[in-house]
Image (tube, rainbow, N blue to C red):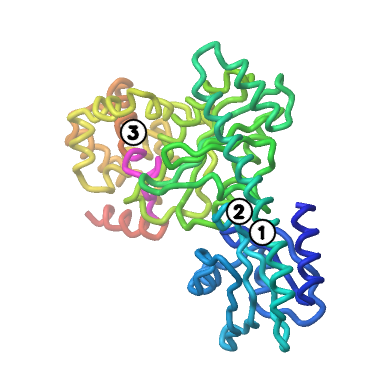
Amino acid sequence: MADVQDLVDEASAILLAPVTLEDRRFRLLAFAAHAEDADSVRVETVMSRGAHPRTREWFESFGIARATGPVHVPADPERGTAARLCLPARWHGVVHGYLWAVEPPEGLTPERIRAAAVLADRAGAHLARLASRRHETERLVLDLLDAAAGGGAGPARELADELAVDPATHAAVVVLGAAPGVRLRAEEVHGPGGLPRRIGVAERSGDLVLVVPADDDPEVHDAAESALRVLAKVTDAHVVAGVGRLVALPVVASSLREARAALRVVRPTPAGGEVPPVAARVHPWASLGIERLLGTAAGDELLEAVRTPAVAELLAAAPELVETAQIYLDEAGSMAATSDRLGLHRQSIYARLRRVESLTGLDLSRGRDRLELHLGLLVATKDSGHGSRPHTRTTEEGRRESSRSRER
């Protein structure tokens, strides 16, 4: 960003005022030194590398996104902000960013504003070139991922040149997605504080697809985490990442299939409610185990197939029976481990399991019956959007039920 920093410094010298340059999403690109006490907006912008959404909404209310010339924004004592001059950074009629100046008490002369507006136009041209490069990278990413089997060598070389990496490098695909209907945009992970240029980014069906050149899996995981952190600054949606395996760049489409399948398993659902902050958000295909079945093309058919009459009967029963059965099966039939997790006396657990067998007609001492029920519960709880484990009651709740059981 050396070019835009020079433009900002020159504009500050012309206007004799503190100047910043932000992109159209109000992310800070460059700023000039501020000799006086800064107001709240400048502190917020410099410290956070961008403006808060409420600040952005306020400035946009003055029509800056549609302006063809300078816009004066008055001071707002309640917000603690000084008066500002906004010079839209335009190119071919499109606003790509904003050059801001904190107006001095004596104001700014028309001559100085006209001279600074020329620099704003130069900044707009620079930002337009960056946007054009991102669009070209996105095209190359999609060309490689859509290449027919055996035809990825050419697109891989083109993308490697664009990303400035060795064509012989390995790469993995990361697909970032939120709940259905929530669209993620590629531009949200570009710019200051965003992803490095060596990671290819494209947008597809509302999800973001990343081609991550890397030497090992931890490097891919770090890139996925970085993308999630960037997105957390611009969206309140819960975003998760499916990750494919590291493969040679020409065959990276195979990693895409795995990443998309992993995302299908873990994607948040609209009815999923609040997601715990400790919930994992990066999900490698290689670590999903039996849950891989849900990400296959036949995943929907699998959901229907494993919901046998016995499983359906249990799912329609009291939640504590579903909870007990799943934990018991998860713990491989260990009564001690089940009792510890539920905080219940063993006799209470035995009583519940007898009710489960009575409802389902299954014999939990038989391996095939256990497999039928365990797989059905695993798939059902995953598909419901509530995670792979039902709620485990607290120890105190367990003591109370255990006491009631002994009394009975």
Quote the CA–CA distance across marks 1 and 2.
7 Å
Nearest the eye: 95 or 387:
95
Residue bearing the label numbered 1? 121
Disc with the residue nearer the chain's start (1 vs 2):
2
Q: Are marks 1 and 2 in contact (CB under 8 Å)?
A: yes
Disc with the residue nearer the chain's start (3 vs 2):
2
Task: Count neighbours of disc 3 (C-alpha within 10 A) and say few if under 14, some if 14 to 19, many if 20 or more.
Answer: many
Which residue sits at x=39%, y=46%? 179
Q: Residue 68's image quarter? A: bottom right
Q: Is residue 223 left or right of residue 188?
A: right
Q: For numbered disc 2, what is the local secondary structure?
A: strand
Which residue sits at x=54%, y=40%? 282
Residue bearing the label numbered 2? 91
Q: Are marks 1 and 3 in contact (CB under 8 Å)?
A: no
**Which residue is most to the top?**
150
Residue bearing the label numbered 3? 379
Which residue sits at x=59%, y=62%? 26
The magenta segment: 381-393
- Residue 211 in percent (x, y) is at 60, 32
